Image (cartoon, rainbow, N blue to C red):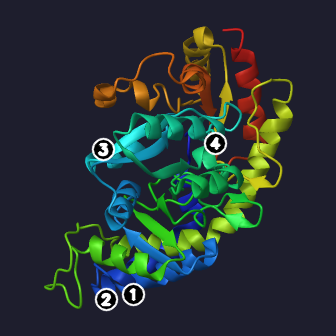
């Protein structure tokens, strides 16, 4: 069994994907072909924003956003400690200071209450200017923007949404990608909406910001490719990946429904456990991961037992960012962010994708329950 079965997806979508790729090959417009512009329109329409800017990958999307907003040396950017390194990595690469914030242990997303504490700490220290918060929609669940938005407004912070895992999720009537000043998302193959390589996009209702982002992705270009208005980067989504994504985006609403089916069935089969995922009222997760908790001292044994049964599992993430060697210079210590550290020690993700049958879900749940005594 594959943790995420892209081969099954291709069996269903393969003819349309091959046709889209063939059109790109026939045109030979491999960079900035019409598929890219069409994809941008479809992405914006799906999310409910006016602008989408396709780019090379999700990390590049975040970095371009920081460039466009002139976030850099002297600026503090608040990030959750329990997420993939890209969220904070781009902050440090820009010369700004990532300030790590603990998570809500129920949702795994940034804790607004702890964010308020960290903002005050940075203000009192006086070394950095609080400028922005990057809220991550972890495991497919949008962050708590209902609490984050008034907090950011109170302190004059820009909210940036890292929707790399959240695409397809919803809070109230707003879809992931529509929160904050702008959002960055990823089309890495394992994401809910993934291409066949690297890819990403930025989403915003700010036309001026979108214009800057389009300039930045092409070496700061202006009216033509040899006029450079600013320093930029090379971060284009190629036409072949756009063709793949156009097919997958069309199928995405149906796949999202199937993800809900799989997650709900897991929930029923594992209802006796105290650690099944928590989805706040009025929210919809895109279920990028189905993540439970197990006792830290038993996790390795449980994973080994499941591997023997042919069941793949994953740990997202085994070490929080404030304890990563790459950020050692910032002085993070064990015990600083207890919710993030406890999550890293206990989380375990089970396979979840739209092409799991009910029987497969039941089998996975049964094997997982059996393994708890490993």
Residue under label 2, please give it.
Answer: 27
Foreground residue among 56 and 33: 56
Of pointers 3 and 1, the one earlier in the residue sequence = 1
Q: Nearer the viewer, mark 4 or mark 3?
A: 4
- For disc 1, the marked residue is 34
User: Mark 3 or mark 1, which is nearer to you?
Assistant: 3
Instruction: Choose the circle earlier in sequence order: 1 or 2.
Output: 2
Alpha carbon of mark 2 to alpha carbon of mark 3: how far?
Answer: 40 Å
Q: Which residue is under mark 4?
A: 112
Frontmost of labels 4 and 1 is: 4
Nearer to us in this view, 257 or 66: 66
> Which residue carries the number 3 mark?
92
Image coords of residue 154 (percent x, y): 60, 54
- Answer whether labels 4 and 3 touch (C-beta < 8 Å): no
The answer to which of marks 4 and 1 sits earlier in the sequence is 1
Which quarter of the rendered picture does the C terminus lie within?
A: top right
């Amino acid at each position: 069994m594959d943790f995420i079965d892209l081969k099954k997806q291709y069996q269903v979508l393969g003819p349309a994907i091959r046709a889209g790729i063939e059109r790109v090959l026939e045109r030979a417009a491999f960079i900035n072909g019409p598929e890219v512009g069409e994809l941008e329109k479809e992405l914006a329409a799906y999310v409910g924003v006016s602008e989408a800017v396709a780019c090379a990958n999700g990390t590049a999307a975040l970095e371009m956003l920081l460039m466009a907003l002139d976030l850099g040396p002297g600026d503090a950017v608040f990030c959750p400690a329990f997420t993939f390194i890209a969220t904070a990595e781009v902050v440090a690469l820009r010369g700004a200071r990532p300030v790590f914030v603990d998570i809500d242990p129920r949702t795994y997303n940034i804790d607004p209450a702890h964010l308020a504490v960290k903002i005050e700490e940075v203000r009192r220290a006086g070394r950095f200017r609080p400028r922005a918060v990057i809220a991550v929609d972890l495991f497919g669940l949008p962050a708590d923007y209902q609490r984050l938005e008034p907090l950011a407004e109170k302190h004059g912070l820009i909210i940036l949404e890292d929707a790399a895992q959240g695409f397809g999720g919803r809070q109230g009537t707003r879809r992931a990608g529509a929160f904050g000043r702008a959002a960055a998302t990823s089309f890495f193959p394992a994401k809910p909406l993934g291409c066949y390589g690297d890819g990403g996009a930025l989403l915003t209702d700010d036309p001026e910001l979108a214009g800057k982002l389009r300039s930045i992705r092409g070496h700061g270009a202006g009216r033509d490719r040899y006029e450079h208005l600013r320093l930029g980067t090379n971060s284009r989504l190629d036409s072949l990946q756009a063709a793949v994504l156009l097919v997958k985006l069309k199928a995405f609403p149906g796949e999202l429904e199937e993800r809900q089916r799989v997650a709900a069935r897991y929930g029923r089969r594992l209802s006796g456990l105290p650690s099944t995922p928590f989805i706040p009222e009025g929210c919809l997760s895109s279920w990028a991961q189905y993540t439970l908790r197990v006792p830290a001292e038993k996790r390795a044994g449980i994973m080994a037992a499941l591997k023997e049964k042919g069941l793949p599992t994953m740990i997202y993430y085994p070490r929080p960012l404030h304890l990563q060697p790459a950020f050692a210079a910032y002085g993070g210590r064990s015990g600083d962010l207890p919710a993030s550290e406890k999550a890293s020690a206990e989380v375990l993700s089970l396979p979840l994708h739209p092409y799991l049958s009910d029987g497969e879900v039941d089998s996975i749940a049964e094997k997982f329950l059996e393994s708890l005594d490993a």
